[in-house]
Amino acid sequence: MLSNKAAGPAKRTSLHGHWSSRMAFILAVTGSAVGLGNIWKFPYVAGQNGGGAFVLVYLACVAIIGMPVMMSEILLGRRGRRNPVATMALLGEEEGKSRNWQWVGGMGVLAGILILSYYSVIGGWTLAYVFKSGMGEFFGADATRVTTIRDGFIGSWALLGSFHTVFMGLTVYVVARGVERGLEQAVRFMVPALLLLMLALLGYSINSGHFGAGLEFMFSPDFSKLTWDSVLAAMGQAFFTLSIGMGAVMAYGAYLPEETSITGSATAVAIADTTIAILAGLVIFPLVFANGLDPADGPGLVFVTLPLAFGQMPGGVFFSTLFFILLSFAAWTSAISLMEPAVAWLVEHRNRTRAQAAVIMGLLIWTMGVGTVLSFNVLSEFKFLKGTIFDNLDHLTINIMLPLGGVLITVFAGWVLCRNSTADELGGAGTIYKLWRVLARYVAPIGILFVFLKAVGLLPDLA
Ligand code: TRP
């Protein structure tokens, strides 16, 4: 056993309560990780970035960068037991360094707010498709019809905005009640069910006759097509899909029981999350090719391919309704984690009740979300920097804020915290600990910065 357990941080408890078990924690983080990122975002970003090589880089990023960042977040959260801002201030001080590390937590809170503002719009879109599927709108529809339905839906700011409102309301509701009640149960059912349905869809996709083309698109890497921009996109996607880089996992880690293995939990989450993303790709791309669609179609891709597949399937109305319900659940359990750091912060620093904090944040985020709602219709031609308002938010958060947060979090855990503190949380100074430390101190921060600087053109080509 390592020193000072009784005296120091180990005795700290969280104001917001604790997970009832290790399983509850794994489920909550899995619920956070598995979401629109896996099924909505992964296929279209992979599609826009040429497929195979992107997928390989993404997998490498999950393993080499994602894992150490996730472990760092959990250990920091558990050690500080506060919201990310307060946790980083406290630990910085405790290690005899600066409280200014709290600004990293602050940037995370902000990133969560920005991400949720558009995440909620897409979450609402998913919700709308529960009803569209249930009413049989996609039954027997061909590609043109499904595309028309989609464009009609997002073309209406009122419709898109209404579902954004409902989705935000649901998120506020759960966060207001506290994370322990409800969430745990939802995830316990949702992740396995989603996995089963993806497998069923995979069966359909295999029979579409274009499975080979889909496989090839996803797994035969053509590195000549890989630009630094797409490497950055792959890295950003790894952050986004694992929910890391902004303190969501840190906030969840604050409620983690003392004895739970951090490495084991992080590994379980990464495997579940990656499996679902790969399955989504294996389902989507064969359908894209079978129906003559464009893999680089963008954010609307799964809202065409999946309804198409379901529309042709026996029992399709039932299965597509079920699928969009599950996807809405997945989005919901992710949205909660995007909001948790901001709400925990309001509760701890502004003396708000949880319910008040959730409503205040909800209103703020909802308002910001209107920008994204409009970028699909009224303001779709209003473009600057990276494109529409949505495109810019997406780029700023995923490709800039999350990686930057990742660098700072790993530097904090690897350099600012002393060996004893981190070894204490990671279960002693064994091989896995040493590996984590090398990754957190050197590989992850340097790797992230390198990719980032390359993509913005600040590093010259050597060759
Ligand atoms: N990981 C979720 C998804 O794939 C989204 C998400 C939830 C997230 N919490 C996060 C992304 C925190 C970044 C940071 O859909």
Image (cartoon, rainbow, N blue to C red):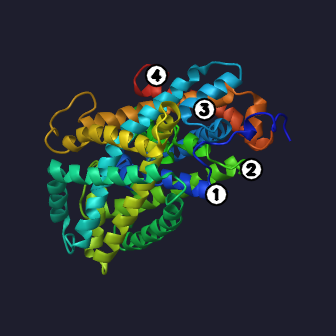
Kindly indicate whether the residue at mark 4 contacts the one at mark 3 (C-beta within 8 angstroms): no
The residue at 33%/52% (across/down) is 169
Q: Quadrant of the N terminus?
A: top right
- Residue 168 vs 345, above or below: the answer is below
Give the mark, 3 or 1, whose residue is nearer the N terminus.
1
Instruction: Quickly name the residue at label 2.
Output: 259
Residue 212 appears in which quarter of the rendering?
bottom left
Q: Mark 3 and mark 2: span between their CA atoms?
A: 19 Å
Evaluate whether residue 102 shows in this view.
yes
Give the mark, 3 or 4, whose residue is nearer the N terminus.
3
Q: Three-letter amino acid code at disc 1?
A: Ser
Q: Nearer the viewer, mark 3 or mark 4?
A: 3
Give SS at disc 2.
loop
- Percent from the top left, x then y, of residue 137? 19, 70
Q: Mark 3 and mark 4: span between their CA atoms?
A: 39 Å
- Residue 109 vs 160, above or below: the answer is above
Q: Three-letter amino acid code at disc 4?
A: Asp
Instruction: Quickly name the residue at label 3.
Output: 87
The residue at 21%/72% (across/down) is 135
Instruction: Quickly name the residue at label 4.
Output: 461
Give SS at disc 4.
loop
In the visual, does 455 lie left or right of 139?
right
Give the mark, 3 or 2, whose residue is nearer the N terminus.
3
Q: Three-letter amino acid code at disc 3?
A: Thr
The residue at 47%/54% (across/down) is 34
Q: Nearer the viewer, residue 380 or 25?
A: 25
Instruction: Quickly name the residue at label 1.
Output: 20
Crowd tier of the residue under label 3, counting other residues whose Cα lies within 10 Å: few below 14, some 14–19, many 20 or above = many
Kindly indicate whether the residue at mark 1 contacts the one at mark 4 (C-beta within 8 angstroms): no
Give the mark, 2 or 1, whose residue is nearer the N terminus.
1
